[in-house]
Image (tube, rainbow, N blue to C red):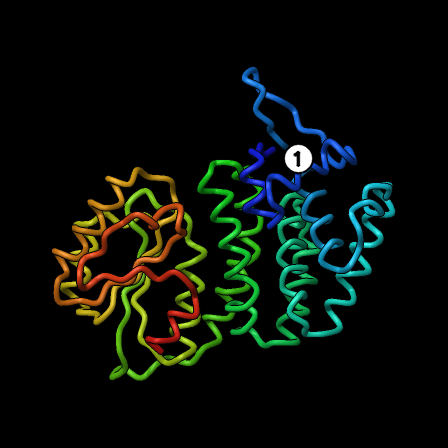
């Protein structure tokens, strides 16, 4: 079970911490536990309820009315909103589905995940489902992981479901022309969160790029040997696991120096990369839309 600070709830739900405190005191919407130093802490069930309340607020409900709902009524209203979102492509549909995916992850609900994923593939196609739904969702999951407030079993559960879908899709793509630009995709040593780089593999290959995929936990010496052998134009990596700023800066500097003739793309959250100074040949890939520049 995860535990969250009020700032974590603010980041994950989009509801300001000040507003959450007011809802607690005025409506008893959620009731946090407190540490010995009187700091609020919340659990998965309270995060889930706040996500659902956020959806209702964005759908026009008043908090005074929401606070009176029993759990069964709250769940019924959420299901109705989600069904309506599936019937249209309005912008609010994204927020509905991201929150629904987080709830599916927390509840370990494979059926709910599969319905959300399959519906979007039918509506948008596989590539836009990845860029418009899955990537934003994984950014939220990455935030939860980065602050060490997500149960590893929950993250592994949802990542493996997505992984199965993406690997199947990659296998179905045609082999790119050998004259096309080559990307080397890898994760640094002790970096095990493969989903981001796997999704990048699909997007790049779907757009005709050659891919050399090394996967997770690649020692730097092995990386250098592979670069020597295959001579890629681009190196792409993701950094998700919590590290100190000094450790991240040292690794980024090393990439830029050792592979000075390559274009290096490093992806990760603001939490991990926000304060890093990048070498001239190295760029921070902040959003999946930036990857389109290299298609």
* Residue 124 visible within the image: yes
* Residue 214 visible within the image: no
- How many numbered circles are shown? 1
Q: Quadrant of the N terminus?
A: top right
Q: Is residue 41 left or right of residue 288?
A: right
Question: On the image, numbered disc 1 is attached to which residue?
Answer: 21
Could you say which quadrant of the image residue 112 lies in?
bottom right
Label 1, secondary structure: give it: helix
* Placement of 87 over or under 27, stated as above or below: below
Residue 93 spot, x, y in % from top left: 67, 66
Q: Quadrant of the C terminus?
A: bottom left
Taking depth in this image into account, of 140 and 187 the one nearest to the observer is 140
At horizontal 76% and vertical 54% (from top left) the residue drawn is 56
Q: Residue furthest top?
A: 36
Residue 14 spot, x, y in % from top left: 60, 50
Crowd rating for badge 1 (residues with CA inside 10 Å; few <14, some 14–19, many 20+): some
At horizontal 51% and vertical 43% (from top left) the residue drawn is 144
* Placement of 64 over or under 83, stated as above or below: above
Q: Is residue 55 left or right of residue 4?
A: right
* Placement of 165 over or under 149, stated as above or below: below
Could you say which quadrant of the image residue 215 lies in?
bottom left
Residue 151 spot, x, y in % from top left: 55, 37
Q: Is residue 124 left or right of residue 237?
A: right
Taking depth in this image into account, of 225 and 34 the one nearest to the observer is 34
At horizontal 67% and vertical 54% (from top left) the residue drawn is 100
Residue 159 spot, x, y in % from top left: 52, 52
């Amino acid at each position: 079970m995860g535990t969250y600070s009020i700032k974590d709830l603010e980041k994950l739900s989009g509801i300001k911490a000040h507003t959450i405190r007011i809802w607690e005191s005025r409506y008893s919407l959620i009731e946090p536990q407190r540490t010995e130093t009187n700091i609020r802490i919340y659990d998965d069930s309270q995060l889930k309820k706040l996500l659902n309340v956020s959806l209702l607020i964005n759908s026009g409900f008043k908090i005074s009315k929401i606070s009176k709902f029993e759990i069964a009524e709250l769940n019924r209203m959420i299901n109705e909103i989600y069904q309506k979102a599936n019937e249209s492509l309005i912008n609010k549909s994204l927020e509905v589905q991201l929150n629904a995916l987080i709830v599916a992850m927390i509840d370990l609900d494979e059926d709910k995940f599969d319905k959300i994923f399959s519906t979007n593939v039918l509506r948008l196609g596989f590539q836009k489902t990845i860029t418009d739904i899955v990537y934003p969702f994984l950014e939220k999951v990455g935030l939860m992981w980065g602050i060490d407030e997500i149960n590893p079993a929950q993250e592994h559960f949802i990542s493996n479901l997505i992984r199965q879908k993406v690997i199947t899709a990659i296998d179905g793509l045609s082999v790119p022309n050998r004259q096309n630009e080559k990307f080397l995709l890898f994760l640094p040593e002790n970096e095990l969160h493969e989903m981001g780089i796997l999704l990048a593999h699909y997007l790049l290959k779907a757009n005709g790029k050659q891919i050399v995929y090394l996967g997770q936990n690649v020692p730097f010496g092995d990386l250098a040997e592979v670069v020597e052998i295959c001579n890629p134009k681009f190196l792409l990596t993701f950094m998700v696991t919590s590290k100190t700023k000094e450790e991240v800066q040292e690794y980024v500097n090393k990439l830029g120096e050792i592979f000075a003739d390559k274009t290096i793309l490093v992806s990760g959250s603001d939490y991990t990369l926000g304060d890093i100074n990048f070498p001239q040949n190295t760029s921070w890939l902040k959003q999946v839309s930036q990857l389109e520049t290299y298609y």
